[in-house]
Image: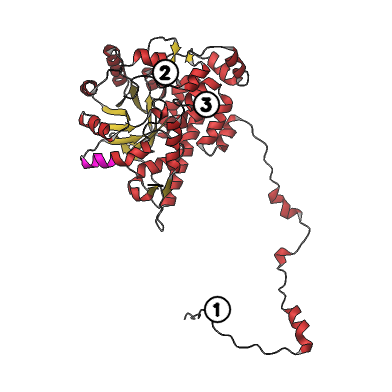
């Protein structure tokens, strides 16, 4: 039988206390002082008490141990900055003009509030998803990045092999420093996608498309936001050229990073593996090679030519998202090129709910993929909750690459996976399909 305990009312009148005889006041006061608990009494510590606390570990200074200690992508970025000369680091880290777009893109992920549910069974978290007809173990893939072996000598090989091991897609850039065939050979069991810049020379574009199909790439990602090069001022100030030029400044900078230069000079010379040899600035290459006359007719040509999945990257308005889907795209990548083209461009994360709503209204099953600004697994979960089907990381994986080659890319993926699983559990969801817009509120909106 349970005993009911009546709550006390602090406002109820109390009965007057009986007066204490004068001779007993001091004794009563002394006896009411609480005794000191044994745990709070001072004593000399015993060796048996100290021994468990004196398990000193030998200091570890290896690259592997430093990577293990990295808990965030920002910590990998710090490592990357210490290991990489300024020009290639800034090429990765920087953006166009005043870099307003990049800052806003990252701030967008900070300006949210998660809305967790409680008392849900989250003992098992499933982060797998389907994207463009196939499964991915995680809702994130590696975005196309150019000049990757300039960041670290393992370059595209490290990225594709890490993606293969994690069972997520890897996207090779037209401006990559490993060929389509070499990446396919390095990661034969990986899911490889190819990113295409349409050239003014359509025959050269067709040649790349055919090579990508022959090498087993199942998805073609055409980028449409590079009619001309963005004003990437860090690259201009650093004299960024292809291949890198040895100047007094770069030699002095390299003296603090001998490992990078040793790797760079003792491996195959850096070239665009999908292009002819080119010497000049990045901006000059883009302006001389890429086609500023592209229209939706060219997208129709691509749709007829490419038999696999077709994704259009660089979508920055709702109308354009709808149009490319109408012209046969199987998916859209909401992206402002990492803030590297038009400064003050729309922020993909802000655009996401509108595009999701518009395509649902059109009864479209086109995939919505998001990049730009992602620096944590929580960012990825927020994007998925607001309507994205998948995400891509560029800088986040390159920071890992520069920090530690293949092992650094593995670590970047591990960090994001752990972030995602923890965020899901704390939100009270066990699988991605349970995420809804109700789990995220955009602050200030």
Q: Which mark is residue 178?
A: 2
Decide which of 32, 407 is in the foreground and name it.
32
Is residue 408 magenta-colored?
Answer: no
Write the start and end of the magenta stretch as one range: 356-361
**Crowd class of label 1 (few under 14; some 14 to 19; many from 20; radius 10 Å):** few
- Along the polypeptide, which appears first: circle 1 or circle 3? 1
Q: Which mark is residue 402?
A: 3
Give the residue drawn at x 24%, y 38%. 365
Q: Which mark is residue 311?
A: none
Q: Is residue 241 left or right of residue 295?
A: right
Name the spot of residue 65 as percent of width and height, x first.
59, 34
Decide which of 177, 354 is in the foreground and name it.
354
Decide which of 186, 101 is in the foreground and name it.
101
- Along the polypeptide, which appears first: circle 1 or circle 2? 1
Whole-angstrom CA distance, mark 1 to mark 3, is: 65 Å
Name the spot of residue 110 as percent of width and height, x first.
45, 42
Whole-angstrom CA distance, mark 1 to mark 2, is: 77 Å
Please indicate, yes or no, whether residue 436 appears anywhere in the rendered image: no
Give the residue drawn at x 72%, y 69%. 36
Which residue corresponds to mark 1? 10
Instruction: Indicate which label's residue lies in the foreground, 1 or 3.
Output: 1
Name the spot of residue 416 as percent of width and height, x first.
46, 38
Is residue 359 magenta-colored?
Answer: yes
């Amino acid at each position: 039988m349970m005993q009911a305990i009546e709550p006390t009312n602090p406002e109820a009148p109390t009965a007057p206390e009986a007066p204490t005889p004068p001779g007993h006041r001091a004794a009563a006061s002394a006896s009411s002082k609480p005794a000191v608990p044994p745990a709070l009494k001072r004593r000399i510590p015993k060796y048996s008490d100290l021994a468990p606390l004196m398990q000193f570990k030998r200091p570890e200074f290896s690259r592997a141990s430093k990577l293990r200690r990295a808990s965030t992508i920002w910590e990998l970025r710090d490592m990357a900055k210490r290991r990489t000369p300024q020009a290639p680091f800034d090429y990765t880290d920087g953006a166009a003009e005043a870099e307003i777009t990049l800052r806003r893109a990252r701030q967008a992920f900070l300006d949210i509030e998660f809305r967790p549910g409680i008392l849900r069974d989250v003992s098992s978290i499933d982060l797998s998803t389907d994207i463009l007809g196939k499964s991915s173990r995680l809702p994130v893939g590696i975005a196309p990045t150019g000049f990757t072996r300039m960041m670290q000598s393992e370059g595209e090989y490290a990225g594709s092999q890490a993606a293969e091991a994690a069972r997520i897609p890897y996207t090779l850039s037209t401006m990559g420093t490993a060929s389509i065939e070499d990446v396919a050979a390095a990661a034969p069991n990986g899911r490889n996608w190819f990113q295409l810049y349409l050239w003014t020379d359509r025959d050269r574009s067709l040649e790349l498309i055919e090579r990508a199909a022959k090498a087993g790439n199942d998805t073609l990602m055409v980028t449409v936001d590079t009619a001309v090069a963005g004003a990437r001022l860090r690259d201009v100030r650093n004299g960024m050229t292809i291949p890198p030029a040895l100047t007094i400044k770069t030699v002095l900078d390299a003296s603090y990073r001998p490992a990078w230069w040793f790797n760079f000079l003792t491996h195959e010379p850096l070239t665009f593996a999908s292009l002819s040899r080119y010497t000049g600035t990045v901006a000059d290459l883009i302006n001389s090679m890429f086609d500023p006359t592209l229209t939706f007719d060219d997208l129709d040509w691509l749709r007829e030519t490419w038999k696999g999945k077709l994704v259009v990257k660089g979508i920055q308005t709702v109308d354009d998202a709808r149009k490319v889907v109408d012209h046969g795209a199987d998916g859209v990548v909401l992206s402002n090129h990492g803030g590297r083209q038009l400064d003050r461009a729309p922020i993909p994360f802000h655009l996401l709910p509108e595009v999701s709503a518009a395509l649902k209204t059109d009864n479209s099953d086109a995939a919505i993929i998001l990049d730009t600004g992602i620096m944590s697994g929580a960012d990825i979960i927020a994007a998925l909750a607001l309507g994205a089907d998948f995400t891509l990381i560029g800088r986040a994986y390159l920071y890992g690459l520069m920090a530690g080659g293949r092992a650094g890319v593995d670590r970047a993926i591990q960090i994001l996976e752990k972030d995602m699983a923890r965020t899901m559990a704390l939100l009270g969801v066990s699988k991605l399909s349970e995420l809804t817009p109700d789990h995220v509120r955009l602050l200030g909106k």
